[in-house]
């Protein structure tokens, strides 16, 4: 052991140090508390043996500084005068390992040092085992976390939610609405938004957000992708031989397959008029008949619909039933286009590119600043779907570690890049400013400009106001007048 021996009497230091060295210990001597502190800080000390009564810093103060101020785990043995039990008790309170009385019995000192050495060995073993245990726990925890994350990604991919990324306030509000609607299966939800904004992702989120929904069916059907003649059979099912081309065994329809869970009607605005009536009856009565069937089949489904049309306008123009519109529009979510939430563009692009690179066994190094600027300037008419496909193409063609402008040259050639108009050019289209011969209705002309500007910015009033050089309050006032 490396022992620090502290005593103000030179003869005592000399005799005790010789004895300790004969026992095989390395000894450093100090004549007072101040010198002892300097030696303690400059060397690796295993044990301190100190007299209590010393000038300036005495043994008790030295003990207090080592144990209570510096929080050291080094053992300290104090040597007290004969019968000085008060000092001995104070030393034990300060954290002394043991105390000896003068004159020091060297055999007793050897026994105490041996106990301290044994305790030091146990303490070191405990620290080593604790460190090994913590490292093992950390390693296992990281492995479990990695496995959990892998399973989570696999689960999200399985249920179709791996593409959902929320980085902007607009999308946080969309997700918050979805979470509220998910708590009540009786509320039919209509999701509106342009193609590629992620309407089905939000529909799946509504379905899977509730813990019990994880085992319930989610059945999606695209109302615009099925031949009208076959649509009823696809939706309601059919009995054997119900019509020409029907299967000989019959078939369960999408509504029946979704029983207990969710039926997602994508592009509901394309639903044939005849089917609209039958669907409304099923939703109201919660039962259906297969085509060619006479048996009543009870169904319990949540309806989530999506459309890229203005369904209210479809109702006004008699292409969609008003009663069905009210039935499917109990809860409403509008997903803004990607150009209306620029905060989502860069993080989504990086996420898509990183995943595409990982599938190809590569590591994606990110975007050069010029690339991010270009991505933000692009209009993304295809929204998130287009962004994802663009990142797949970028990773496929990328050569350098970080994507530069050469890797996205295919975007710059697209007409969808939003560029500021040059001075004196027509910002709303070449024919929009042709003046009539007979006179000008300025109010109507202003309405036309405002409407075009709103369309250009996807209905985002803040961006429209900035575009027109107005404050949002001024724009709101103009819109009220309109």
Image: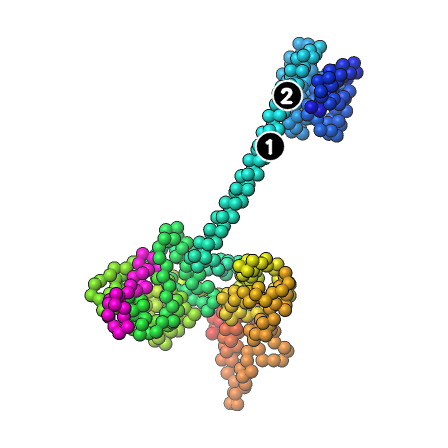
Residue displayed at 53% across by 45% down: 142
Tag of residue 116: 2
Q: Mark 1 points at which residue?
A: 128
Q: Position of residue 150 (x, y in %)?
A: 49, 51
Q: From the top left corner, tell me how far across and down residue 95 is, in percent.
A: 63, 22
User: Within the magenta stretch, is there residue 135?
Assistant: no
Residue 221, quarter of the rendered image: bottom left
Q: Does residue 302 lie above or below 437 as drawn? A: above
Q: Where is residue 419 in the image (x, y as percent from the top left)?
A: 60, 73
- Between 191 and 19, the residue placed more toward the observer is 19
Q: State which quarter of the image contains the N terminus.
A: top right
Residue 68 is drawn in which quadrant? top right
* Residue sticking out furthest to the bottom: 437
Task: Please report the residue visible at 75 percent of the width from the left and 23 percent of the height from the top.
Answer: 28
In the rendered structure, find residue 474 and report the number of the disc placed on it. none
Instruction: Specify the segment rendered in magenta.
Output: 238-262
- Considering the whole magenta stretch, tell me its main secondary structure: loop
Instruction: Mark yes or no: residue 477 visible.
Output: no
Cα gap from disc 1 to disc 2, whole angstroms: 18 Å
User: Crowding near pointer 2: few (<14 within 10 Å), some, many (20+)?
Assistant: many
In what element is the residue under mark 1? helix
Vertical arrangement, residue 454 with respect to residue 202, above or below: below
């Amino acid at each position: 052991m490396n022992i620090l021996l502290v005593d103000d009497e030179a003869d005592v230091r000399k005799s005790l140090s010789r004895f300790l060295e004969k026992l095989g210990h390395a000894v450093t001597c100090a004549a007072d508390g101040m010198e002892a502190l300097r030696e303690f800080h400059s060397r690796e000390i295993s044990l301190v043996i100190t007299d209590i009564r010393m000038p300036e810093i005495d043994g008790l103060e030295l003990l207090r500084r080592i144990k209570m101020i510096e929080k050291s785990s080094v053992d300290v043995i104090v040597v007290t005068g004969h019968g000085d039990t008060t000092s001995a008790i104070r030393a034990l309170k300060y954290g002394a390992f043991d105390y000896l009385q003068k004159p020091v019995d060297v055999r007793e000192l050897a026994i105490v040092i041996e106990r301290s050495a044994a305790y030091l060995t146990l303490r070191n073993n405990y620290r080593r085992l604790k460190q090994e245990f913590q490292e093992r726990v950390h390693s296992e925890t990281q492995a479990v976390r990695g496995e959990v994350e892998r399973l989570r990604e696999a689960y999200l991919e399985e249920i179709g939610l791996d593409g959902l990324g929320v980085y902007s306030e607009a999308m946080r509000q969309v997700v918050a609405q979805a979470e509220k609607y998910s708590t009540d299966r009786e509320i039919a939800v209509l999701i509106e938004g342009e193609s590629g904004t992620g309407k089905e992702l939000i529909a799946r989120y509504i379905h899977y957000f509730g813990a019990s929904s994880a085992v319930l069916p989610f059945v999606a059907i695209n109302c615009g992708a099925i031949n009208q003649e076959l649509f009823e059979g696809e939706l309601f099912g059919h009995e054997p031989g119900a019509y020409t081309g029907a299967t000989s065994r019959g078939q369960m329809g999408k509504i029946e397959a979704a029983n207990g869970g969710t039926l997602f009607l994508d592009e509901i605005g394309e639903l044939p008029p005849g089917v609209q009536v039958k669907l409304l009856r099923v939703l109201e009565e919660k039962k259906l008949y297969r085509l060619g069937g006479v048996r009543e089949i009870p169904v319990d489904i949540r309806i989530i619909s999506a459309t890229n049309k203005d369904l209210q306008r479809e109702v006004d123009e008699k292409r969609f039933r008003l009663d069905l519109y009210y039935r499917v529009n109990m809860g409403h979510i509008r997903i803004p286009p990607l150009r209306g939430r620029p905060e989502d563009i860069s993080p989504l692009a990086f996420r898509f590119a990183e995943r595409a690179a990982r599938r190809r066994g590569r590591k994606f190094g990110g975007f050069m600043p010029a690339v991010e600027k270009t991505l933000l300037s692009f209009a993304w008419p295809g929204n998130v779907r287009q962004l994802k496909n663009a990142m797949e193409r970028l990773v496929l063609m990328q050569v350098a570690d970080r994507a530069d402008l050469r890797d996205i040259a295919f975007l710059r050639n697209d007409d969808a890049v939003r560029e500021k108009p040059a001075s004196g050019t027509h910002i709303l289209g070449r024919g929009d400013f042709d003046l009539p011969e007979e006179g000008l209705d300025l109010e109507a002309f202003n309405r036309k400009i405002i409407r075009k500007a709103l369309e250009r910015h996807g209905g985002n009033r803040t961006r429209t106001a900035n575009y027109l050089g107005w404050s949002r309050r001024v724009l709101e006032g103009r819109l009220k007048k309109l």
